[in-house]
Image (cartoon, helix red, strand yellow):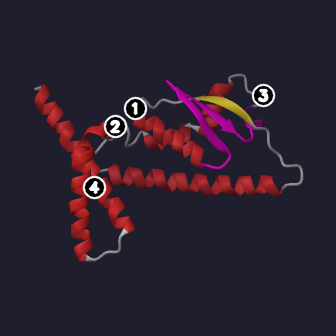
Amino acid sequence: MQFYQNLRAFQRRFILATLSFLALWLLLVPFTLSEIIVGIGVAILVTYLSLAQLSYLDDVKLDWRFPVNVIEYLAYFLYCLIKANIDLARRIVHPQLPINPHIVTVETRLQSALGKLLLANSITLTPGTLTVDVQGQQLQVHWIDTTAIAGAEDSVQCASEEIVVAFEKYLEKFIR
């Protein structure tokens, strides 16, 4: 029974990695038939050679809603990215430079290493926040304006709600 479970994980990992490498190839190369055929071959070869290092892909929930969930997450991330850029630009051009930077601790419900990695990268890529460290279920985040949590009794909970909860909602749909 264990052999079949390992084989199934191997198959899922192989398919997901091959499709990921193929998608990456197609984004970088113009669409001609010969290049698509070469892309398929290269994606399969790269997947085969790196399969042992791709165990983190086992945490991906691969079902029929996977592409929709990823697109929803990317759309939300893009929205947050634009909103944060506008907010940061407003702060920069403001005469008093209204910032109150601190390192805050936030907690995540995500259990997998891949989920925490995606969450930390989402936080870091959003202007005004930077993930400094991840330890267990807690992330240390440098936040440019902590006035939203200044008077909060439970600053970890408040900071988590401000920074993490929305990203988690989308990530939990396709990451274990």
The secondary element bearing badge 3 is classed as loop
User: Which label was assigned to residue 151?
Assistant: 3
Disc 2 marks which residue?
56
Q: Position of residue 58 (x, y in %)?
A: 29, 37
Q: Earlier in the sequence, mark 1 or mark 2?
A: 2
Disc 4 marks which residue?
19
Residue at left 82%, top 58%? 93
The extreme front residue here reads 49
How far apart marks 4 and 3 lie (CA) works out to 48 Å
Estimate how packed mark 4 is, as few (under 14), some (14 to 19) or many (20 or more) residues with alpha carbons within 10 Å.
some
Foreground: disc 1 or disc 2: 2
Q: Amino acid under label 1?
A: Ser
User: Which label was assigned to residue 169?
Assistant: none
Q: Earlier in the sequence, mark 4 or mark 3?
A: 4
Query: Is residue 139 shown in magenta?
Result: yes
Q: Earlier in the sequence, mark 4 or mark 2?
A: 4
Q: Amino acid under label 2?
A: Tyr
Q: Earlier in the sequence, mark 4 or mark 1?
A: 4
The secondary element bearing badge 4 is classed as helix
Residue 173 sits above or below residue 73 on the image:
above
Q: Earlier in the sequence, mark 2 or mark 3?
A: 2
Q: Which residues are magenta?
A: 126-149
Disc 1 marks which residue?
112
Q: Amino acid under label 3?
A: Gly
